[in-house]
Image (cartoon, rainbow, N blue to C red):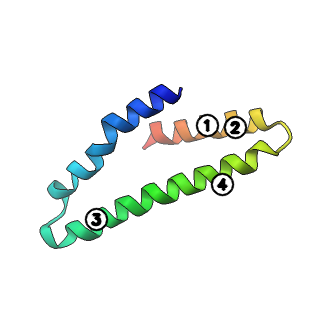
Amino acid sequence: MLFLMGSQSAFFGPVKYAILPQLLNDKELLAGNAWVEMGTFIAILLGTILGGLLVGVEHALLWIGIIVVLFRLGCCLT
């Protein structure tokens, strides 16, 4: 799973920056890049916090499985 997640990041990470010049004009590019960086940082931070909290919860594996499935379904629906 770690290898697959790393592969996904390696392939799709640069895409989020490569598409910005096509979607934004030159004056908006700096702000757009900042928003992408902020979103990535907040997602990593919230994932770390949520993972740390879930470890101590009773039936942690069940809750982790439910959350992973819900995130996956959310990604498929968007």
Distance CA(mark 3)–CA(mark 1): 28 Å
Q: What element carries label 3?
A: helix
Q: Which of marks 3 and 1 is nearer the N terminus?
A: 3
Distance CA(mark 3)–CA(mark 4): 26 Å
Q: Quick check: marks 2 and 1 in contact, CB under 8 Å? A: yes
Residue 23 position by quadrant: bottom left
Q: In this view, does 42 lie above or below 11?
A: below
Distance CA(mark 1)–CA(mark 4): 15 Å
Tell me where residue 14 appears, x and y as whole percent.
28, 44
Tell me where residue 67 appears, x and y as whole percent.
65, 40
At 74% from the left edge and 45% from the top edge, which residue is drawn?
A: 54
Q: Earlier in the sequence, mark 3 or mark 2?
A: 3
Q: Name the residue under label 1.
A: 68
Q: Which amino acid does label 4 sit on?
A: Ile
Q: Quick check: marks 3 and 2 in contact, CB under 8 Å? A: no
Task: Answer with left or right where residue 60 lies relative to residue 37.
Answer: right
Q: Is mark 1 on a helix, strand or loop?
A: helix
Q: What residue type is labelled 2?
A: Ile
Distance CA(mark 2)–CA(mark 1): 6 Å
Q: Quick check: marks 3 and 4 in contact, CB under 8 Å? A: no
The label on residue 55 is none
At 38% from the left edge and 60% from the top edge, which residue is drawn?
A: 37
Q: Is mark 2 on a helix, strand or loop?
A: helix
Distance CA(mark 3)–CA(mark 2): 32 Å
Tell me where residue 63 appears, x and y as whole percent.
74, 39
Query: Which sits in the foreground, 71 or 36?
Result: 36
Q: Name the residue under label 4.
A: 49
Q: Which of marks 1 and 4 is nearer the N terminus?
A: 4
Mark 4 vs mark 2: give the one in front: 4
Q: Which of marks 3 and 4 is nearer the N terminus?
A: 3
Mark 3 vs mark 4: give the one in front: 4
Q: Name the residue under label 3.
A: 32
